[in-house]
Image (cartoon, helix red, strand yellow):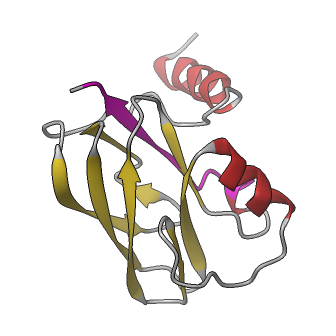
């Protein structure tokens, strides 16, 4: 089996998992926090960049989100209960609440979220079919 075929096979296996995050894109940079920190996420080609970050528990992250795509997107971060609600919902836009921001084409927005527990936390775009397409990310929350 060639390298490209093996990479596709591994990538397919990883996306079938609970978090659907590309294993090749490991978290980069230092573990952020504790305290308050800012993370800039760019949406390009219906993907979050970076799609994985690390923070210490007790860190409040201000997410600055830049949508460079010609279509709308959203960033929703939070516990699985939040994601379940959004998967079943029909909201086209989100009010300014912690952990949620909706963006039109070419827009930049921000939201904040406090990571109080040392557990992985998903980032997802819940617009129709966007999660299926791969608009997911992960925040690895590390004990202090």
Q: Residue 106's image quarter?
A: bottom left
Going 35% across and 34% down the picture, which residue do you hit? 141
Q: Name which quarter of the figure residue 37 lies in.
A: bottom left
Q: Quadrant of the C terminus?
A: top left
In the rendered image, residue 139 lying in the magenta stretch gets the answer: yes
Would you say residue 124 sits in the magenta stretch?
no
Task: Please name the residue shown 57% across and 28% down the image.
Answer: 11
Where residue 24 sits: x, y (%)? 40, 30
Q: How many marks?
A: 0
Please tell me whether residue 33 is drawn above or below residue 9 in the rendered image: below
Residue 120 visible somewhere in the drawing = yes
Q: Which percent across, then down, holds residue 107?
A: 43, 89
Which quadrant is home to the N terminus?
top right
Q: Residue furthest left?
A: 30
Residue placed at 79% from the left, 68% from the top?
A: 128
Which of the pair 48/115 is nearer the observer?
A: 115
Residue 118 percent location from the top left of the image: 39, 29
1 displayed left or right of 58: right
Give 77 or 16, whichever is nearer the viewer: 77
What residue sits 55% from the left and 17% below the top? 6
Q: In this view of the protein, can residue 25 be seen by the observer? A: no
Q: Is residue 22 above or below residue 77?
A: above
Q: Which residues are magenta?
A: 131-143
Q: Residue furthest top?
A: 1
Horizontally, residue 89 falls left or right of residue 95, namely: right
Q: Give how far across and how far down residue 9 sits, in percent.
A: 63, 21
Residue toward you, 99 or 1: 99
């Amino acid at each position: 089996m060639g390298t490209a075929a093996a990479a596709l096979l591994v990538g397919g296996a990883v996306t079938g998992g609970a978090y659907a995050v590309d294993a090749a894109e490991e978290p980069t940079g230092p573990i952020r926090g504790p305290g308050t920190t800012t993370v800039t996420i760019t949406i390009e080609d219906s993907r979050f960049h970076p799609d994985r970050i690390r923070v210490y528990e007790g860190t409040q992250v201000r997410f600055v989100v830049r949508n460079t795509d010609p279509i709308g997107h959203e960033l929703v971060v939070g516990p699985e209960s939040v994601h379940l609600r959004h998967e079943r919902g029909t909201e086209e836009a989100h009010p300014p609440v912690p952990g949620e921001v909706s963006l039109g084409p070419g827009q930049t927005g921000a939201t904040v979220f406090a990571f109080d527990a040392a557990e992985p936390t998903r980032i997802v775009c819940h617009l129709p079919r966007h999660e299926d397409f791969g608009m997911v990310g992960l925040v690895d929350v590390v004990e202090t």
